[in-house]
Image (cartoon, rainbow, N blue to C red):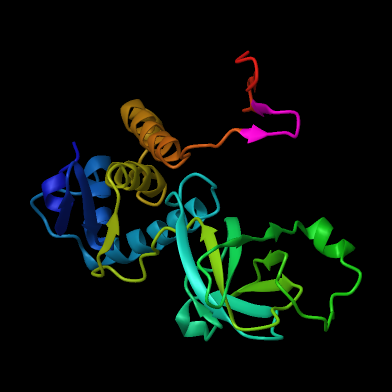
Amino acid sequence: MLSPLRLRAGLFSCGAVHLTSLTGEALISAALERLGAKDPQNDLSAEDAAQGLGVLRRMVGLWNTKTLLPPVRQRSVFSITASDGNYTIGEAGHTPDFAGDRLRFLEAAAVIASGEDREHKLGILTPQRYQAESDKGVTQTGMPQSIYVEPTVPVATITLFPPPSATMTLVLYYKPLIAQFTDLVTGHYFDEGYEAALVSNLAVWLAGPFRINVNEDPMLLAEAADTRGAIASLNEGPEEMAADPNGYFSDADSGWLMETGE
């Protein structure tokens, strides 16, 4: 069984929501106990900790490629300068123009002119639409109308069309990446549900290296799938209905005519 009291290094309470700080050591220990590969009364060995940390990092890295497993969304603002339409974003250690998550799931973008509060929405270019831009070295500046993000490594590249004519604020709405565990002792805060999902799924991932037949524990497999699914469901978030010029509002399954209520 899971031992949440052993896991929780710290809790932040706000109403009914609890943010949980988890360390790599605590997750690995709990996962091995769930797998039956560690006695809860014994400390985590250095060898098991090192092996478990590598597996945990690979699992979180894979989760960060899944649209619905990273947290819902984040709004970040950055200052952009006149005549400059090219920027990089990523971890501070790689000296990007903007320090933050390397963009993987950009959901929306806008610019705010100096002295204004209004966000001017930017169109997000797909690789195909970016390819169709005939003058990628455009020198004419103005209010940016579109943005292209290329998930280059180690920092992502941002291109604005056209480049701004003055200093402005760039607003990005995106899914932040799941915090990566670079060591055993640094704690990271997670929303409710992540603790159970990380522990049960890590237990499944550790079964191979620890020579345990996970198929003999169908409850663990079901638990891992259910908790991962719960995170994905949590992160779907609300969706707005789209409208067309004829006054129809629709979602993926139905339509609604505002004038008649049908």
Question: Above or below — where is 223 with respect to 33?
Answer: above
Residue 126 image position (x, y, % from top left): 75, 56
Residue at image coords 52%, 58%: 173
Q: Is residue 193 left or right of residue 76?
A: left
Question: Above or below — where is 177 with respect to 3?
Answer: below
Residue at image coords 54%, 47%: 67
Residue 136 image position (x, y, % from top left): 84, 75
Q: Is residue 159 left or right of residue 208?
A: right
The image quarter containing residue 125 is bottom right
Residue at image coords 48%, 39%: 236
Which residue, as the protein is rendered here, is positioned at the far left?
41
Q: Residue 104 lies in magenta, yes or no?
A: no
Question: Above or below — where is 86 with respect to 235?
Answer: below
Residue at image coords 56%, 62%: 119
Q: Is residue 66 left or right of residue 128?
A: left
Residue 120 image position (x, y, % from top left): 62, 62
Residue 25 image position (x, y, % from top left): 24, 61
Foreground of the two, 64 or 236:
236
Which residue, as the protein is rendered here, is positioned at the far right?
134
The answer to whether residue 29 is seen in the rendering is no
The quadrant of the image that shows the C terminus is top right
Q: Which residues are magenta?
A: 242-249
The answer to whether residue 253 is seen in the rendering is yes
The quadrant of the image that shows the N terminus is top left
Q: Residue 248 lies in magenta, yes or no?
A: yes
